[in-house]
Image: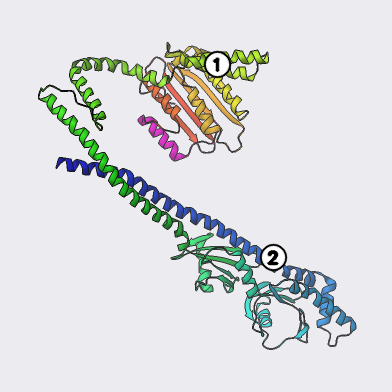
Amino acid sequence: MIKQKFMLRMLFRYLLALLLPTILMGSIFAVAGYYYLKEQYRAANLSLLEATLTQTELMLNELDSMILSFDGNADTINRCWHVLNTSRLGYQENQDLNNIVNVISAPVNARGYLDSIYIYYPNPYGRYILSKQGIVTLREEEGWYESYLEHLGREKIWSERRRLDDGTEVVSVYQVMKHKGVVVLNLNARNVERILHSISSFDGQGIYILDNEMHILFQEGKDYGYTGEELGEFLQSMGRASRDDAENVIHTMSSPSYRWHYISVIPNRVFYRLPILIIQSTCLIVLFLLAAGIVLSYFVSRQNYRIVGNVIQLLDAAREGKTLEPQARQKFSDYASAIIQELIQNFVQQDYLKVQLSEKKYKLRSMELLAMQSQMNPHFLYNTLETINWEIMGLTGERNKVNEMVENLSEILAYSLDSRREYVPLSEEIHITKCYISLLQNRYGDTFRAEWKYEEAVLEANVVKFILQPLVENAVNHGIRAREDGYGGIIRIRIRQKGDVLIIRVVDNGVGIGKEKLEKLRRDLQEGAVGLDHIGIFNTNKRLQLAYGEDAGIWIGSRKGLGTMVRLLFSIDGSGGDKVKN
């Protein structure tokens, strides 16, 4: 029974370790993929709508050309007015008429999306000029003329969709001229919609173009059954460029020049394709891992149980005072043998360990400080750098920037390798930090400069080694180098003493830290946690507390986009930082 419970528990743990990350990552990727795809489609769709707007306004530019000719050119206006208001046309009038027809027929012949153009000035004969035909007399059923009379005096430009006598669907764009005349530009609806079709790119997308009175002028792609009034409500209620309807995502854009509104409708299912694919892939991976995990967990659990069983037997024998016989090493019992040997040593040396523990408690403070302060002791590297320095001078015959860099690095190494001193004068710490800054400036060029400000009196204060270098390194890597311009970085180091308390500030004008990240960083420093992004600051904070007490430590202030200030506060006589509150 015990063996079965152990096996099941181990099986559950292994399966949980295998499946939980896969399910979690699959869910995260599915959600992230959905929102990423939706944002990409949103941006692409707005670009598409803008291209549609640009294309239609290029078509409507023909109307501006007509206005320039028939409402801005006095000679053309007089000739056109005279032709329409003359009862019988003579030779000169016919010549003028031919010239006018040629002007308005040229764009119609050249542009497939143009059906025709009308030019009308008020005249007693009910005439207007039609491209390709010339003078035409108004009939009672002329719908465009009724629209002109209805809007005259109220609007200067408007649009409507209508059907010509030959069955052609057109969108007529009207613009009233100064002399109460009107230019009517008739766009072939089918040809325009074919052009819009070549622009659209999303599966199941529907594009609507509405006039200022919310009448549908053009509709391309899938028809979602929206009426002009419903689309107008979308325009009034959205207040932004996009919104999610029950089943669709809707984007809008408006043209102030011609008062047209552009609306795109994309079904929500388009955005679910990538998440569904990720979920399907995740399910297949989970099934594979489930099968592999069951087999793997069974063999690992059985092996672990055999090891644990051997250990339990030996513990029972030791508890009962039996002689502990050496155990023969088996194929799967190497770990068990090592554990058994350790247990035997623990039984024999139990009293000795108690004495050692009491001594270790007193040494723990200095050992932890030393371990965090020096992580390696590469004397050979220091000697090699000195040799390289002399070799460079021998080859070049003079000192150069490389010699300076090698000497700075050698001084830093010698400083770190000196394990005889835990505390050094502040003047040495400042000198080593300046060597480090010189190395960084040689590496990154003129991206930043350092400004120092301190009183001579503080230079003799004894401080823990390497308390300035990690702060400068953090300012460069996380502040200055992340600036968009890449230049103009400034690091200001301010040191002053107030009583027995030493206050050190390192201020940079880098990118700063966001509010949430800053709060987490402060909380981790207060709780003694170790962060991954600013390990130098966490290390320095811990060393200060070990050396000067729990009241010593680091405080960080920052403003996104302005920079960061790191303040060190500790009492030189070891009484902590509670004497100063600023």
Q: Position of residue 322 (x, y in %)?
A: 10, 23
Q: How many marks?
A: 2
Q: Quadrant of residue 216?
A: bottom right
Q: Position of residue 497 (x, y in %)?
A: 47, 18
Which of the two discs, 2 and 1, sits closer to the camera?
1
The verdict on residue 355 being magenta is: no
Q: Using residue 314 as the reference point, say whether residue 367 is left or right of it.
A: right
The residue that mark 2 highlights is: 58
Position above or below: 124 against 229: below
**Neighbour class for label 1 at 10 Å: few (<14), some, many (≥20)?**
some
92, 466: nearer the viewer: 466
**Neighbour class for label 2 at 10 Å: few (<14), some, many (≥20)?**
few
Mark 2 to mark 1 CA distance (whole Å): 70 Å
The residue at the point 30 percent across, 45 percent down is 293
The residue that mark 1 highlights is: 385
Magenta-drawn segment: 508-529
The verdict on residue 526 being magenta is: yes
Task: Tell me the quadrant of the picture where the C terminus can be found.
Answer: top left
Q: Quadrant of residue 10?
A: top left
The residue at the point 36 percent across, 45 percent down is 21
